[in-house]
Amino acid sequence: MIGVTPVAEAITMAADFGLDLVEVSPNAEPPVCKILDYGKYKYEEQKKKNEAKKKQKVVSVKEIKLRPGIDVHDYEVKMKAARKFLDSGDKVKVTIRFRGREMAHQELGLQVLIKMRDQLEDLAKVEQMPKSEGRMMTMVLGPIVQ
């Protein structure tokens, strides 16, 4: 077979075996090809993708809304919810909403956020420090990965 290119020879070889010539690495010099069953190859790739997808953990952000003058029991209920969210691997966005004249005392809201941060330091790390946005003050806590 004089004058036959390696590509043509490979295609002929693949056809003889009843398989396909698949380009595995097109950017390599020279491009890398394999003789294999293309349907089976696609099936294996899809299985790998699905397996990788199963192992991923989707992290959602749960929001807890507070007020600057929150009562002790109400605060404890919100803390319990925050602990539950962090234990399940979710992030927690703590939001304090100021109404009316409460805007003049934003330090009270900041104290509530700092208190919450300190009580959750064994479970969470601060991903976003407390910041004011209009009438809201927010902080984002993320779970500590063990």
Image (cartoon, rainbow, N blue to C red):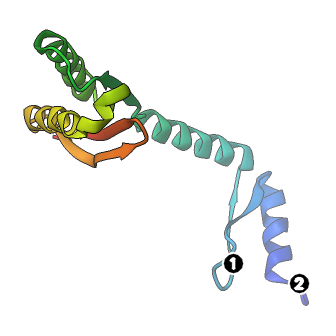
Crowding at label 2, few (<14), some or many (≥20) Cα neighbours within 10 Å?
few
Above or below, 67 relative to 41: above
Crowding at label 1, few (<14), some or many (≥20) Cα neighbours within 10 Å?
few
> Which residue is depicted at the point 90% across and 89% down?
2
Q: Secondary structure at mark 2?
A: loop
Above or below, 80 relative to 114: above
Q: Residue furthest bottom?
A: 3
Inspect the image, locate mark 1, and give the three-letter code of the amino acid beneath it: Pro
Comparing 125 with 97, the one in front is 97
Give the tally of numbered discs: 2
> Which residue is depicted at the point 32% across and 35% down?
103
- Point out residue 42 in the picture as x, y percentages from the top left corner: 68, 46
Q: Image quadrant of residue 87?
A: top left
Comparing 110 with 61, the one in front is 110
Asked if residue 98 shows in the view, the reply is no
Residue contact between numbered discs 2 and 1, judged by CB atoms under 8 Å: no
Front label number (2 vs 1):
1
Q: Image quadrant of residue 108?
A: top left
> Which residue is depicted at the point 20% across and 35% down?
113
Comparing 103 with 144, the one in front is 103
Q: Residue furthest top?
A: 73
18 sits to left or right of 138: right
> Image quadrant for the C terminus?
top left
Q: Image quadrant of residue 84?
A: top left
- Point out residue 9 in the picture as x, y percentages from the top left corner: 82, 75
- Point out residue 48 in the picture as x, y percentages from the top left corner: 52, 43
> Image quadrant for the N terminus?
bottom right
Inspect the image, locate mark 2, and give the three-letter code of the amino acid beneath it: Val
The residue singled out by tag 1 in the image is 31
> Which residue is depicted at the point 86% across and 75% down?
8
The residue singled out by tag 2 in the image is 4
